[in-house]
Amino acid sequence: MTQSVVNRLLMAALLTVCAVWLIIPFGMAILWSLVDPSEPWTPDRLLPPVMSFSRWQNMWENSSLKPALITSYTLAPLAALLSMGLSMPTAFAFGRLSFPGKEFYKLVALMPLVVPSFVTAIFFTSILFNLGLHQWRFGAIFFAHAIMFMPYGIRILTVSFEQVRQDHIDAARDLGARPLSRFVVAYLPALKPGIFATLLIVFIQSIEEFAIAYIVGTPTLTTIPTLLFAQMGQDFVRPNAAVLSLILVVPNVVFMLLLERLLRSANPSMASGKG
Amino acid sequence: MTIPHWLRVALLLLPGVGLIGAFIGSVVFIAIAQSFGYYNLTGESAFTLDDWRAILDRRLFERSVAYSLYVGLFSAVASVIIAYPLALWLRKPFPGSSLIGAVLKAPLLVHGLVAAFLYVNVIAYHGIVNQFMQWIGLWTGPRVLQNDDNAIGVLILQTWKNMPFALLLLTGAVQAISDDVLDAARDMGSGPFARFRKVVAPLTVSALQAAMVIIFIGAVADYSFQAIAGPINRQSMAQLMVFFKGDGQWNNAAVVGVSLMAIALIGSGLLALVARLFVKGASLR
């Protein structure tokens, strides 16, 4: 049997497995979200007997979905902007400067990824209680998200700063550009994909974050993941949980695909139009 | 006036590494301090080992540690065992390989809670798995598959979610091995398994370690998969910590939190060491 035949057989087998692990679960979720309340979907039927968007409408009108969407989609862009802004100076230092202990500081920057998120969430709440700031839920989650996801920004922007070509900076300086103009003409073109990638990855991480939003935000502040978790616990109604799952997953898939394109295009010479 | 180099570096590091160090450092510090009786939210704050003694003596804690280790270790090992052959297969591009890579990595895009919902939906009492098993005649009636005692559901979910991450790291590592190296091994008479043991595994051990460590830390501290799909008679360490916190027992939560951090740190170090020794031993055999 030739290699290409083996590949084809393996591919067919694998695509079948993937259909089982992706198409069936998502297909079921879509169907459950369309089950009309007038007639239940019983096990003896292959498809829901009556399909409509009434569950979607019901979730929109009668649940915490609207405030959760507002909170999540306010929190995420703000956290992304703050995280990117805070990451930039450190990324510049890591990418463009030499100094003793650089590798150590790079490890310190990864700390939020190493400490389990529920430990961070619970003892951050404890700090808030100790400081008397436990009612400051939105601000606390916003602040925590910006810091927790900074490692992604620092890593991505460090690579972007490393890729800025020294001859571009020198040329700008030789032509009399001031520091701000130098940043705009020499750094910014190479940094752009990294900046967008940072904004997008922190945005996605913030939208998806559960531990801090759950521990710090409960009971008054709801985000989409905490609402979904509640719907899957004591308030479990399968069609409602299906609606929320799809609301959480679909935009993220689109954003992640966009992120992949951005990271692929993070080529400095291409981005700067020179090279 | 020019700013001294050290001061410039310090000012640049302050908003990034400085804030991270202060934030995570405070969290870890308060966890450790509360586990020893300091910073109590109610009552007096004074040094004590009582909370450690009380928690370490409890069977609940012991079971929780064993359970979290079981989930962490199984998830890390299963993910890399499945990812390795797939990474090797996808090393050289072939028609359709990018599609397969994309489909395999798709779970990375799915939120853990959504994954848990999709899973419990499929294995529900009247779900598709039960229907299928009855249709092919293996089962006479539907069975309760959710919240099974052996945490098979949690392990499936962890592997489903983490295998693509291991695949991502291992694919990069195996693609970095040049054809010349593998051709030389083949010319010297090495079969596929010997090539894997003596060439591929040693050259990709760093990616293997990184994948295992990151998956282990995430899985050992799992909360949501356990809360939704895990056995109802056991608690993961994160779940136990949340339970104590919810009950106002902050010191006990702190003991569990500090233990969880220690287990994640020591366990991941040991796992990385064992992976390296295993690969080294296999390559010498």
Image (cartoon, coloured by chain):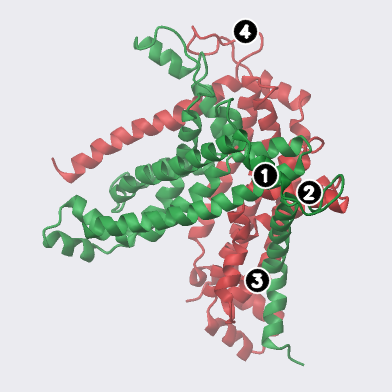
Chain colours: A red, B green
Judge depth for marks 2 and 3 and give the one in front: 2
Q: Local crowd at mark 1 within 10 Å, few (<14), some, or many (≥20)? A: few
Chain identity of mark 3:
A
Q: Distance between the residues labelled 3 and 4?
A: 58 Å
Looking at the rendered structure, the secondary structure element under dot 3 is helix
At horizontal 66% and vertical 25% (from top left) the residue drawn is: A233
Looking at the rendered structure, the secondary structure element under dot 4 is loop
Q: In which quarter of the image is the C terminus of chain B?
A: bottom left
Q: Position of residue A224 (x, y in %)?
A: 69, 36
> Closer to the camera, A38 or B120?
B120
> Closer to the camera, B99 or B206?
B206
Quarter of the figure with residue B81: top left
Tell me the tag on residue B109.
none
Q: How far apart are marks 1 and 2 (CA)?
A: 22 Å
The reply to whether dot 2 and dot 3 touch (C-beta < 8 Å) is no
The reply to whether dot 1 and dot 4 touch (C-beta < 8 Å) is no
Judge depth for marks 1 and 4 and give the one in front: 1
Relative placement, left or right, of A196 versus B184 is right
Quick one: label 2 or label 3, which is nearer the N terminus? 3
Q: Where is residue B209 in the image (x, y as percent from the top left)?
A: 42, 56
> Closer to the camera, A58 or B196?
B196
Q: Distance between the residues labelled 1 and 4?
A: 56 Å
At horizontal 58% and vertical 25% (from top left) the residue drawn is: B233
Q: In which quarter of the image is the N terminus of chain B?
A: bottom right
Q: Of the residues shown, which amino acid type is indicated by label 1?
A: Arg
Give the residue number, with chain letter if any, for mark 2.
Answer: A126
Tell me the tag on residue A90.
3
| Count of numbered badges drawn on the protein | 4
Relative placement, left or right, of B64 versus A230 is left
Judge depth for marks 1 and 2 and give the one in front: 1
Tell me the tag on residue A39.
4
The answer to whether B4 is drawn above or below residue A108 in the figure is below
